[in-house]
Image: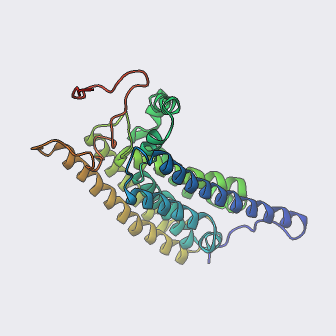
Amino acid sequence: MTVLPAHGEHGPGRVAADLGWEAFAILVVLLLVSAAIAQVAALRAAAPRVRWPWWRTLAWHAGLLCAGLALVGPLADAARSSFTAHMAGHLLLGMVAPLLLVLAAPVTLALRALPAPSARRLVRLLRTPFVRVLTHPVVAAALNAGGLWLLYTTDLYRLMHGSVLVHALVHAHVLLAGWVFTASVVGVDPDPHRSPVTVRATVLVLFVAAHSLLGKWLYVRPPAGVEQADARAGAQLMYYGGDVVDVTLMVLLLLGWYRATRPRTGLRTASAAPSATRGAASPLPRPSAPARRRTPTTR
């Protein structure tokens, strides 16, 4: 059993703390439900023009479910006193959910569902220098792996169990950093700044090494307040569970590379799966000009 600080003392302080945690749970549920509804609304808006693959819809809602299981409910409650439960939530929130959400291709769906002016604004946003830097595999990997090392090798792990604000910020970072990193490596959405496959493969290997090393570190040096047996179980879950997701990322990256480089004997069909190496289901045109390098068509 892990020994962590209580959420508050008995009396008014405890009541205020409990209200804070309840508010956090309600906010998470509202955000997840809103994301699910938004995807359904986008499907309806794009339906007259696009046949959206059912498995992408399933991936989106499964990703939201994984995030929800890690943030609210029995697993989230157990994670406040069990490092092993916390690590199970970490795998769901920081690795499984991001992978499923990336495979759902939400940007592609948004570009097909939004009105033309809104779609052009989204394209301009994706082309900004900030997004270009943020989505570079090196930066994304540093934010993801660096955040985990900071969480488990400093006092931040203890603090997040005593403050609902720190708890919310840490978990938001875990989800978003995992999402950006996964998209930078095996993303299927339009990306005008897609890095070469060699860069992404190298970064992925280095990230896997950093993640595995952290698992070994936690096995022998657990965070303050975590018992050795609990720490070892959690570290093993992180090490072996993370390997499953990491191998999946490697397979998707290699599969995307193969699809992008294999010889083609005919025209690519509209229903072909998007490549994880080349980027998205369709090229990302400039806001005010047609996409480049396309074969002219007769109007």
Marks counted in the figure total 0
Looking at the image, the residue that sits furthest to the right is 12
Q: Is residue 223 visible?
A: no
Whether residue 246 sits left or right of residue 235 in the image: it is left
Occupied quadrant, residue 246 = bottom left
Q: Is residue 155 above or below residue 279?
A: below
Q: What is the basis of the colouring in this image?
A: rainbow
Q: Quadrant of the C terminus?
A: top left
Q: Position of residue 229 (x, y in %)?
A: 53, 78
Q: Quadrant of the N terminus?
A: bottom right
Whether residue 159 sits left or right of residue 279 in the image: it is right
Whether residue 195 sits left or right of residue 65 in the image: it is left
Q: Position of residue 34 (x, y in %)?
A: 61, 54
Q: Is residue 239 visible?
A: yes
Image point (22%, 26%), residue name: 296
Q: Position of residue 273 (x, y in %)?
A: 28, 50
Whether residue 288 sits left or right of residue 247 in the image: it is right
Closer to us: 139 or 280: 280
Q: Position of residue 85 (x, y in %)?
A: 56, 72
Q: Is residue 103 above or below residue 116?
A: below
Image point (43%, 46%), residue name: 48
